[in-house]
Image (cartoon, grey):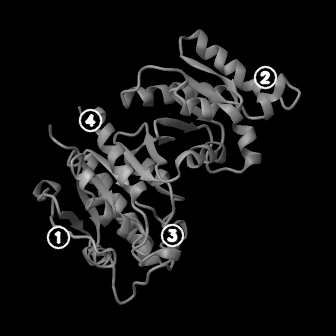
Amino acid sequence: MKKPLIAVTLGDPAGIGPEIVVKTIADKDLFAEANCIVLGDAKIVKQAIEVTGVDLKVNCVEEPADGDYSEGVLNMIDLDNIDMDKFEYGKVSAMCGKAAFEYIEKSIQITMDGKADAVATAPINKEALRAAEINFIGHTEIFAELTGTNDPLTMFETNGMRVFFLTRHVSLRDMLDMITKDRVIDYVERCTEALRRLGVTEGTMAVAGLNPHSGEHGLFGWEEVNEIAPAVEELQARGFDVKGPVPADSVFHQAALGRYNSVLSLYHDQGHIATKTLDFDRTIAITNSMPILRTSVDHGTAFDIAGKGIAGAVSMIESVRLAARYAPYFTR
């Protein structure tokens, strides 16, 4: 069986991205599951190989099809966009922010063109993007713009537990105004379709509660009574396999045990805390409802340890592994 080809971005060169990428390419178990084409700067990659001590040969190509996908070979498209005289590990810089954006841009281009099967991204730094005057807050917004996708869905997966997010990068105060019946209905519809596209067609989706004990019928808040429960009831009447609101202090545990195929978390930290507590290193972000599949580590650039060769690559390895697992559903 042909292995999926995953486009892997280097992330911010000043962070741990280059180190975890080269460790990922060198992983023997992952080699059996996926081929990788790295988008980055060859000078940074060679330095990361030296820092980490992995045994890899760098093979720069113009097109993914030109790669030598043998064990021990790191194939890459060299964008040659880092001036090593100005480069410094662990520092926010416009040069690195711009470079990280260009790696993402190239990964999207080759995957949209069918030259790669999915994208797996290493971490970027929001301050570096801002310093480079790139007006995106993060990966999701970049992918949305460059793939022409309106409001892409974020899904976390860790150890088989899947979590979607009704709201993400907004304050808790603003989040409350976004919990409406119409929004819950829209997200359950789109999350169900996203799961189908990933090959998940069986099981029940749970909608998490917001207030303690899901509000106790209005004793501790009315969002469940006025917005969430009516949305779930309408969805059930239309044939959706969905349950809720399920109290947030138990719904993620139940999902981890397999009672639900996914959970719709109502806000950023509600779902992040649950997944990362279950398994921080193996919490992988999947950006859904786009023309292409994108997975990502869900940790930052770790500037404090960048360049030391000690960053763990488990999350990056799992990100590529998950991209390879789901890629056939996007390319068939």
Mark 4 vs 2, N-terminal side: 2
Residue 36 percent across, percent down from the top left: 24, 55
Residue drawn at (32%, 64%) of the image: 23
| Residue behind mark 2 | 225
Circle 1 sits in a helix, a strand or a loop, which is it? strand
Residue drawn at (17%, 63%) of the image: 72
Residue type marked 3: Ala
Q: Residue 241 falls in which quadrant of the image? A: top right
Mark 1 vs 4, N-terminal side: 1
Task: Give left or right: position of 2 versus 47.
Answer: left
Q: Residue 313 falls in which quadrant of the image? A: bottom left
Q: CA distance from mark 4 to mark 2?
A: 41 Å
- Report if the CB atoms under discs 3 and 1 are less than 8 Å apart: no
Mark 3 vs 1, N-terminal side: 1
| Residue behind mark 1 | 57
**Residue 302, which numbered label?**
3
**Residue 95, which numbered label?**
none
Mark 4 vs 3, N-terminal side: 3
Of tags 4 and 3, the one toward the viewer is: 3
Circle 2 sits in a helix, a strand or a loop, which is it? helix
Residue type marked 2: Val
Circle 4 sits in a helix, a strand or a loop, which is it? helix
- Report if the CB atoms under discs 2 and 1 are less than 8 Å apart: no
- Report if the CB atoms under discs 3 and 2 are less than 8 Å apart: no
| Residue behind mark 4 | 328
Mark 3 vs 2, N-terminal side: 2
Q: Is residue 247 above or below residue 129?
A: above
- Number of other residues with Cα within 10 Å of mark 1, as a class: few under 14, some 14 to 19, many 20 or more: some
Residue type marked 4: Pro
Of tags 1 and 4, the one toward the viewer is: 1
Q: CA distance from mark 3 to mark 2?
A: 42 Å
